[in-house]
Image (cartoon, rainbow, N blue to C red):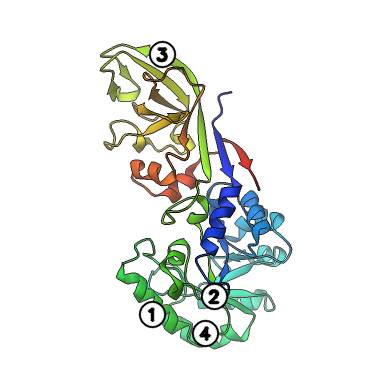
Amino acid sequence: MTVSTLTIDLNALVANWRALDAKSNASVETAAVIKADGYGLGSGRVAKALCAAGVRRFFVAAAEEAIPVREAICDGAEICVFSGHGAGDTDLIRDLDLIPMLNSAAQLDRHLSALPHRGYGVQLDSGMNRLGMEPAEWAAVRSRAEAGDLRLVMSHLACADEPDHPMNAQQLACFTEMTSGVTVPRSLSATGGTLLGPDYHFDLVRPGVGLYGGLPFEDARPVVTVALPVIQIRDVAVGEAVGYGNAWVAERPSKIATVAAGYADGLHRMIGNGLNGATLNVFASGTACPVVGRVSMDLITVDITDLAEAPDQLEILNDQQQVDDLADIAGTIGYEILTSMGRRYQRQNIGG
């Protein structure tokens, strides 16, 4: 078989949610962010496993993302939409019973006009300048927003993955001031904010990347394993080059495995030999083997000279090399690695 395999450990996913849930006291609800198709792992399967574990509130980025989630989750669970109530969203919000997080006075007007008896939340801008109502806008519409079926008031931290960054305390103070006297649940923290401690927890935390094994949750269990099939093995003599641009030249007699995966599968071209100075390994039964030459669209090449036996497959994500390790080599973040995994992987689940 020449198809790469992406294995999703749903038991590890649930364990990560429980571990983050344990960071706050019993009065704080722990929700789950499953936007971008569950960070690339399949929002339906992720939502089903988390709902069985006790999650009763989920967050997606856009109303369309809620379709597979609503089909998968338990009765009574809520789905909140970060982008709010956009033009054209009314039917989905009504039919899927979604909770839009309204980001502006215009969205509040749209929602109250189109669906006056449906619940909603409000997103506030506490300093990130991305989504949400700024203090003056919120002050102008607050009484009207609170008069309806307001379910949640939230904001988002810009620098929560840097615990000592002064922006965290600045946003905490702003959010606290903007929501003084609010009687519905409040939420400020995703994964990073959850780890900052109880001052940032309010009534609800909503971890995202930490559920999937990513930083800043250093104690997360790995959720994703990726195994790549070996298509061909060849002998390469001293002085012969491998791959595009002759980027790698053998300095010893070498055995080179050609492996079925490339940048079309989310293995960024930057991780290839010679592009950023970092060394990427893949693993054969725990033994590290360096990737050599450039990453192409569908293939990578690996030096397996030191292996005792020729492997049938090599792992690029496992317990030894996790998403943020790969992200460091690529000069990006774990979020991008997770959400870039292409459609050609054969996906399989453990647990759930």
Closer to us: 106 or 77: 77
Query: Which residue does the image show at 48% across and 44% down from the upper left?
Result: 340
Query: Which residue does the image show at 34% across and 37% down from the upper left?
Result: 270
Q: What element carries label 1?
A: helix
**Nearer-N-terminus badge (4/3):** 4
**Nearer-N-terminus badge (2/3):** 2
**Nearer-N-terminus badge (2/4):** 4
Badge 3 amino acid? Arg
Badge 1 amino acid? Ala
Against 101, is 331 above or below? above
- Spatial separation of the CA atoms under disc 4 and disc 3: 69 Å
* Residue at which label 3 appears: 234
Residue 60 position in % (x across, y down)? 57, 60
Query: Which residue does the image show at 30% across and 24% down from the upper left?
Result: 245
Mark number for residue 141? 4
Mark number for residue 173? 1
